Image (cartoon, grey):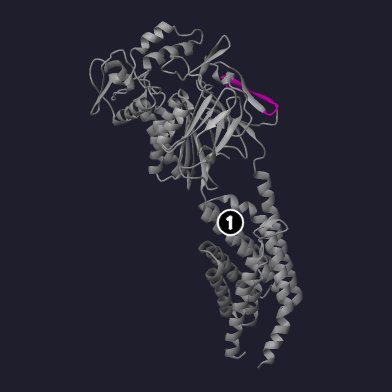
């Protein structure tokens, strides 16, 4: 892939990640009566960068999403939460992908689970209370579901995308 | 297959580790009960980073309570300190040097004596000891003549303070600090706890509750007893003191009539205006003083007195109705 | 290049492991939570016994007093102390309420969720 295309694609994915993040922010934060659950679709863009471009570009997309979201519609607290969750989940996704033993769904679920656990841990530290952990079972199942969903989307979207990109060469 | 299992195990371990790592940092709630001060039970709860920190807070608290218990004790004297009992014994014939806390407490009592029109009287010891004896034996009522005779030897005009020495111009006078001592001591004990670094705590010294910083999940919840049984209301407070004076706390019954421990200095008999008075105030000493004073005053006078101390109050009457100061309901849940 | 089938299997194992963790955590939380109100009896500052408020019982506290739990309430049915303040006390049933026998050093308290930290 030509360097120019790389850079452009990174930018596009980052911008899309922010846009998707904003759309999710507008959504009500409970589905089926379960509070605090979001689909995390922005992760699809991060994974797209990870699979199409590379770790560095994916890290940029992730960082851009967290930072710009904070600047545009977040608070410092929300920044803290998404930073911790995001960094941890990114690291885990990179690790899982590197082992070459997991498919897109596996990587996605690994990232989603780590994201939720990381945020719960931060909440516990910030509030100085262990009560937040009672919610973990729900969050874990939610992560498994959304992670699988996002993984399947990426799995379906990557081949055509990849083909389209390589046709530009 | 084996490697996949290893990866999953590692991931699960990571999750569990993260979970426990943050668990260690969260504060746990510790509680302890003491029964050796102020003739009552003291309960202390705090959120601490470690049991060691809690133990340090308990030591500071217990030490302070014990120390003040000895200073304000009117029934026993202790080696090396001139306490209230010493004052009662000697101040009629000579000035007695006392610890500054006793001077400070008497200062509060003197102020309240004036502001409550004499309804809060820490010099009522001679009258109160008659009632105390009757309550202990629970078989007779005090003789009115004895009460009136004892009442002649009461009043803060007979109590003189010079520097750190107390003297009585009436040798028959005796102090009874029961109306304020617990509140004052609870407040001092709370300060001792704060000095050890513990911020989120609550202390209950025989019904005198002092709250520090809020719990991790919100304010401290203090239940107000319904004189008829159960809880009348719940208060959510932090950084404030809550005290209730009630006719059901210490009493004895004779021929079906209940005689409780809050004596009105004017009638020389237990006050019968209300069943209970609850006060919320930043200062524990004032809260205690107010709850006793208001118990013997009209609601109108009580509201004025409470307001001058930035305190909120609740009066529960015998017919079940209640009166409140303007801001009291804001604490109720 | 790993076969798709292998990767799929690993993915499934991962998802299953996550759900299993959730289930285990849930069970742990469910079985370690304290359900319902209890009657806690303290003797000289130390816990003497803890009993469910929902079960009728008669507890002898070291010969000092007898605590009865009946019909969702608890009270001191008899005591050897002189004042009998604890016996005169009305039965308690709500979280945070307590009956104290001062000379005996006994505290009877109702604890549980949705209750108060202290009662005045």
Q: Which residue is painted at 70% across and 74% down in the image? A: A104
Percent coordinates x, y for residue B166 in the rendering: 26, 23
Report the quarter where the C terminus of chain B lies.
top right
Tell me the quarter of the picture where residue C16 sits.
bottom right
Q: Report whether residue B52 is seen.
A: no
Question: Which residue sits at x=59%, y=71%?
Answer: A90
Neighbour tally class for label 1: few under 14, some 14-19, many 20 plus, Cα within 10 Å? some
Q: Quadrant of residue C66?
A: top right
Residue A36: x percent and y percent?
64, 59
Task: Tell me which residue sits at (75%, 70%) in the image.
Answer: C9
Relative depth, front residue between C46 and C54? C54
For residue B170, above or below residue C30: above
Q: Nearer the viewer, residue A11 or A75?
A: A75
Residue A132 on the magenta span: no
Q: Which residues are magenta?
A: C56-72
User: Label 1 belongs to which residue?
Assistant: B19
| Residue C61: in magenta span | yes
């Amino acid at each position: 892939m030509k360097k120019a295309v790389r850079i452009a694609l990174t930018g596009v994915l980052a911008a899309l990640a922010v846009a998707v993040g904003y759309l999710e922010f507008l959504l009500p934060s409970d589905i089926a009566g379960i509070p605090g659950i979001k689909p995390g679709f922005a992760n699809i863009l991060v994974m797209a960068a990870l699979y199409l471009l590379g770790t560095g570009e994916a890290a940029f997309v992730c960082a851009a999403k967290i930072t710009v979201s904070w600047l545009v519609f977040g608070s410092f607290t929300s920044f803290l939460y998404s930073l911790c969750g995001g960094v941890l989940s990114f690291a885990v996704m990179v690790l899982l992908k590197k082992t070459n033993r997991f498919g897109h769904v596996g990587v996605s679920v690994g990232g989603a689970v780590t994201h939720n656990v990381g945020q719960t841990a931060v909440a516990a530290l910030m509030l100085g209370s262990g009560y937040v952990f009672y919610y973990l079972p729900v969050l874990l199942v939610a992560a498994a579901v959304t992670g699988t969903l996002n993984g399947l989307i990426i799995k379906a979207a990557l081949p055509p995308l990849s083909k389209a990109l390589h046709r530009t060469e | 297959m084996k490697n996949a299992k290893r990866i999953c195990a590692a991931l699960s371990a990571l999750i569990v580790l993260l979970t426990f790592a943050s668990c260690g940092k969260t504060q746990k709630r510790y509680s302890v009960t003491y029964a050796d001060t102020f003739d009552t039970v003291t309960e202390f709860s705090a959120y601490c980073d470690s049991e060691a920190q809690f133990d340090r807070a308990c030591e500071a608290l217990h030490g302070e309570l014990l120390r003040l218990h000895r200073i304000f004790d009117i029934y026993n004297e202790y080696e090396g300190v001139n306490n209230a009992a010493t004052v009662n014994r000697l101040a009629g014939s000579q000035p007695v040097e006392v610890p500054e806390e006793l001077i400070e407490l008497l200062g509060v009592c003197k102020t309240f004596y004036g502001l409550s029109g004499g309804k809060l009287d820490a010099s009522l010891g001679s009258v109160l000891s008659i009632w105390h004896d009757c309550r202990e034996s629970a078989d007779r009522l005090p003789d009115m003549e004895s009460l009136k005779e004892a009442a002649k030897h009461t009043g803060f005009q007979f109590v003189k303070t010079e520097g750190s020495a107390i003297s009585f111009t009436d040798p028959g006078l005796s102090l009874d600090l029961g109306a304020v001592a617990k509140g004052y001591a609870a407040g001092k004990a709370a300060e001792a706890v704060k000095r050890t670094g513990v911020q989120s705590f609550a202390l209950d010294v025989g019904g005198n509750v002092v709250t520090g910083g809020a719990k991790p999940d919100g304010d401290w919840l203090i239940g107000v007893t319904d004189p008829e049984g159960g809880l009348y209301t719940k208060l959510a407070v932090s950084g404030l003191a809550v005290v209730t004076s009630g006719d059901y706390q210490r009493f004895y019954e004779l021929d079906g009539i209940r005689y409780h421990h809050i004596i009105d200095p004017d009638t020389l008999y237990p006050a019968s205006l209300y069943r209970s008075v609850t006060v919320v105030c930043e200062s524990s000493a004032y809260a205690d003083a107010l709850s006793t004073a208001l118990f013997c005053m009209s609601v109108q006078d009580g509201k004025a007195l409470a307001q001058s101390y930035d305190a909120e109050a609740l009066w529960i009457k015998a017919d079940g109705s209640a009166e409140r100061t303007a801001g009291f309901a804001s604490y109720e849940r | 290049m790993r076969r798709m089938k292998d990767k799929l299997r690993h993915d499934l194992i991962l998802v299953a492991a996550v759900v299993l963790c959730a289930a285990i955590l849930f069970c742990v939380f469910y079985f370690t939570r304290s359900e319902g109100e209890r009657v806690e009896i303290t003797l000289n500052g130390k816990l003497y016994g803890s009993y469910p408020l929902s079960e009728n019982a008669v507890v002898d506290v070291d010969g000092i007093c007898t605590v009865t739990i009946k019909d969702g309430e608890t009270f001191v049915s008899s005591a050897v102390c002189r004042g009998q303040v604890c016996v005169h006390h009305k039965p308690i049933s709500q979280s945070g309420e307590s009956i104290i026998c001062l000379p005996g050093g006994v505290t009877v308290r109702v604890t549980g969720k949705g209750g108060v930290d202290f009662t005045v």
